[in-house]
Amino acid sequence: MIEAINQILNGLQLGSVYALIALGYTMVYGIIRLINFAHGDVFMVGAFVAFFSTASWGLPFYIAVPLSMAVCAVLGVTIERLAYRPLRYQARIAALISAIGVSLFIEYGTSLKFVFGPNFRVVPRPFNVAQWDVGGVQFSNIQVIVLVTVVVLLTALQYMVTRTKMGKAMRAVSFDHDAARLMGINVDAIISYTFALGSALAAAGGVLYSAAYPQINPFMGIMPGLKAFTAAVLGGIGNIPGAMLGSLIMGEVDVLSAAYLSSRLRDVFSFSILILVLLIKPSGLLGKAGPEKV
Amino acid sequence: MKQKFTGGLPFVLAAAAVFFALREVLGITEIVNAYWQLILDQAMIITIASIGLSIIYGFCGQFSLGHAAFYGLGAYAAGLISKLYGHGNYGVFLLGLVAAAAFAGMVAFLIGRPILRLRSDYLGIATMGFGIIVKVLMDYSNKWIPATNGATGMTGVPQIAKFPAVFIVLLLVVLLVRNLRLSSFGRAWMAVRDDEIAADAMGVDTTRVKTLAFVLGCALAGLAGGLYAHRYPIVHPSSFDFLKSFDFLIIVVAGGLGSLSGTVVTGISWVFLLEVLRAVLGQSFIDFRGVLYALALILVIILRPKGLLSGLEWQALIPRHVPGARSAGRPAEPGADGSMKGGMPDAGA
């Protein structure tokens, strides 16, 4: 029983990291209907920037995280500007292929020897790991930090989207580009802003992920990115609470199936659940039938 | 109004004969050495599978991201039959190819019946999930069938799929798909692609049409997999993971959705591009291959968003007066059903 609670806590930790990535997917999808396959690689870049700034340049952790978020925000906006905006008025498949190209470009580009290099690197712990034990249930300060950071970021995001002018503009653009433009909203700027926001969250996810599972390499973004995206679809893509719900389910399924069923077959369980949910509810758990909104 | 479409057939056969003869001459003069022959065979095998995806996505508009899974299922089915019972026997090889196509088609039927109710991106994600599941099961397969060797990869399949065999299969597949495309089936695919609701209203059995396209396309992927297993010394699960599915998607989209000639030309040239990059870069710059490949992909799609040969078909293959032959200007878009369009402005808006 205690063991199960420990595993559920681990699932919660993984799920909340997925949530940070999934939000970028879901916001971008909500606003331009694009599966941004390069998002998992932004997550990877975030982890690397934090790694270099703490391990090589000796910056403290509380500076490394915002720095990595800022770098990735710029990266996300650049990707959108160069690879997606020229295809804005083309069929959506063109932008999807472009996204695959960007993803490969970042992966192979960063694995060049003079960039990040192809090897696995071990991330030094940014702080001492403390392990607590409450009645047999064990948890570490890393888990606490991950959960607290995720809750803070998500609350800020939810506030931003529902309460601020920028969030209102985002929702308007996702509802109807043309009408939003007629109302005086700068659609391109809002799209850039969405990419910046999503990429910054992915960077935070990358830092937390590498603090929790301290090994990074240029291809590390593929699987978490895919899982997070799947989580966003599971919850109903384009829907922010849906992305969080989907991510928590995905994290729990990942951890619990690896712990109790088979670690080699865990992807089978997570993707089977995705297919089953889609068959029963074709637009995801919290998705509405018809166009999805942010 | 009934049109005769048979006019181009002699040209296709003549072109095939010329290509075959050219290859023979180049082969004798050693310009096409064993290495380039391997690449050519691989290009043709990839093209066969891509034609399968071209049916599913290019013609019928069903967004599938799990094509590599069916390619892999075919490779394992044919490979196992030849490895266990064939030992280089051509009859067993042919039987293996048939079994590969049938097995992939059967799995496609079972998974397609429920899953094809999904639309656009959701269908893509579900098929991608299926592809990942199949890949994991291949890694695990030695628990059930020891001969597959699981994650180490299956060896010991007789290497008897030489150039003529692969070439003939490719030619037959092109002719088969051409004829289907020109038949009423082909017109039903295009109708479903362009507007599923309208097609339904006009009396097209859309479920049946979509399932048939999916089964046929996946069977072709299985057939290509069967050839692959008989051409390359190792059948490894990692050759069939979801990244491989992107290769097929890239070929179909870069060739121009709905263009059979485009798929064939791009399929072959894309594989050659990769190998030429390897040759040009040399050992010291080989790390840049992936970067250049990705750049080429981004540039192609930005410069020709509708694909290299979109709206163009080789006349002899698909004559101009066939409905849809030159209308690929409006490519099948995920969400052609209108329900997913949401805030996306239409082209040219």
Image (cartoon, grey):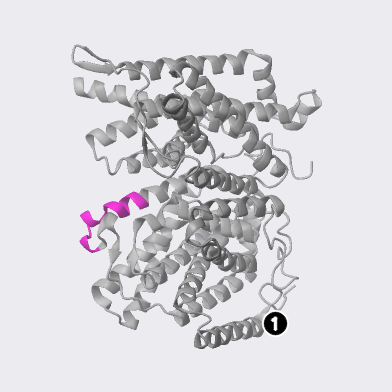
Quarter of the image holding residue A261?
A: top left
Magenta run includes residue B146: yes
Magenta run includes residue B260: no
Q: Position of residue B218 (x, y in %)?
A: 46, 61
Q: Which residue bears the numbered disc 1?
A: B7
Q: Which residues are magenta?
A: B135-147
Instruction: Specify whether residue A292 is in view.
Output: no
Residue type marked 1: Gly
Q: Nearer the viewer, residue B174 or B146?
A: B146
**Left or right: B24, with A128 as reference point:** right
Q: Position of residue A293 (x, y in %)?
A: 61, 28
Q: Residue at x 59, y 68 (%)?
A: B264
Quarter of the image holding residue A177?
A: top right
Task: Name the chain letter of the residue that bears numbered label 1.
Answer: B
**Left or right: B98, with B171 as reference point:** left
Give above or below for B249 relative to A143. Answer: below
Identify the image quadrant of the N terminus of chain B.
Answer: bottom right
Give above or below for A275 relative to B145. Answer: above
Q: Position of residue A152 (x, y in %)?
A: 48, 14
